[in-house]
């Protein structure tokens, strides 16, 4: 199932291919960052399909639609600002939603479905999902957020293991690669809280923030994927093997096991 394009989504996939091609650049630095987001998008589609499962074909199709569109704004964001850091440029999720509303890309959907996809795209990067969303919007948003996290973990595991010269410049968000973890960040992770972006000081803190995303995962199917892919183990392997770090890590591993074994 993972590699098939649903027939009703073939035109949207074709448009996405052309959209990516329209950003193609001779500047290898730019192109490397565009490639990063193109591959990310395709992998988020794959993860969204795996998370949604095939019990409800319409839900599966909408999940893939939202996944394919969720990061459209990343391309103009990087071309214009040379960064993926929203706080230094634009809110890329809002930009993705704008791109969607300016084009007739989702006309093959019912109006309510189109709205649900656009809202899920617009909100995919919020710190916390607000209450009161339409159930279909809420569900799609949760799928996209889970799928996005699953693939961002893949991107960063590759990034942390790559030689410096091969790392896409936009991926590291500019944190200093120092052998230090901040106590406040470790404490948040150890107590099962999402780490706030504003509390980060080093690249290791950023890795801890990424581990804390586990606490924000919505679906059991996502948790199974995380376990199958050894995401936590691979991230943990890039951190210093010190007491406080190992303690915080055991909270994360314990959380995964508890949720997987919960009825
Ligand atoms: Fe995104």
Image: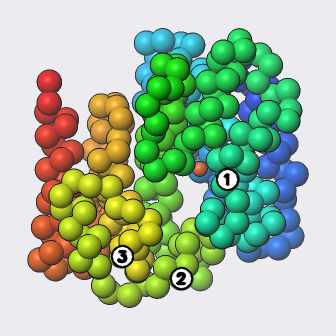
The x and y percentages for residue 123 are 57, 41
Which marked residue is nearer to the observer: mark 1 or mark 3? 1
* Res 164 label: 2
Query: Between 92 and 161, which is closer to the camera in this rendering?
Result: 92
- Give the image's coloring scheme: rainbow
First in sequence: mark 1 vs mark 3: 1
Q: Residue at x 35, y 35 (%)?
A: 218
* Res 204 label: 3
The x and y percentages for residue 126 are 51, 47
**Image quadrant assignment for residue 14:** top right
How many neighbours does mark 2 have within 10 angstroms: few (below 14), some (14-19), or many (20 or more)? few
* Left or right placement of residue 162 versus residue 205 in this view: right
Q: Residue at x 67, y 53 (%)?
A: 92
Query: CA separation, marks 1 and 3?
Result: 24 Å
The x and y percentages for residue 55 are 43, 12
**Image quadrant assignment for residue 10:** top right
Q: Is 154 located above or below residue 121 in the figure? A: below
Query: CA separation, marks 2 and 3?
Result: 16 Å
Q: Is 99 located above or below residue 66 in the figure? A: below
Q: Regarding mark 2 in the picture, which secondary structure is present there?
A: helix
Query: Between 244 and 234, which is closer to the camera in this rendering?
Result: 244
Q: Residue at x 14, y 30 (%)?
A: 262
* Res 92 label: 1
The x and y percentages for residue 148 are 50, 45
First in sequence: mark 2 vs mark 3: 2
């Amino acid at each position: 199932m993972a590699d098939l394009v649903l027939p009703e989504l073939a035109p949207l996939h074709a448009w996405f291919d052309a959209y990516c091609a329209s950003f193609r650049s001779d500047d290898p630095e730019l192109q490397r960052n565009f490639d990063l987001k193109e591959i990310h998008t395709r992998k988020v589609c794959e993860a969204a399909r795996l998370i949604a499962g095939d019990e409800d074909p319409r839900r599966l199709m909408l999940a893939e639609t939202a996944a394919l569109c969720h990061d459209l704004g990343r391309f103009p964001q990087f071309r214009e600002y040379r960064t993926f850091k929203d706080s230094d440029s634009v809110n890329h999720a809002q930009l993705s939603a704008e791109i969607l509303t300016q084009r007739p890309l989702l006309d093959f959907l019912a109006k309510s479905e189109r709205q649900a996809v656009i809202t899920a795209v617009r909100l995919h990067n919020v710190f916390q999902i607000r209450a009161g969303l339409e159930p279909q919007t809420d569900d799609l948003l949760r799928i996209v957020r889970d799928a996005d996290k699953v693939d961002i973990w893949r991107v960063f595991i590759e990034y942390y293991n790559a030689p410096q010269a091969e790392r896409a410049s936009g991926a590291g968000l500019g944190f200093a690669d120092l052998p230090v973890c901040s106590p406040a960040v470790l404490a948040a992770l150890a107590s099962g809280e999402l780490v706030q972006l504003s509390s980060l000081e080093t690249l290791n803190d950023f890795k801890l923030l990424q581990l804390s995303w586990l606490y924000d995962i919505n679906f059991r199917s996502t948790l199974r994927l995380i376990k199958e892919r050894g995401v936590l183990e691979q991230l943990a392997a890039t951190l210093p093997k010190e007491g406080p770090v190992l303690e915080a890590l055991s909270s994360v591993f314990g959380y995964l096991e508890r949720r997987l074994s919960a009825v």
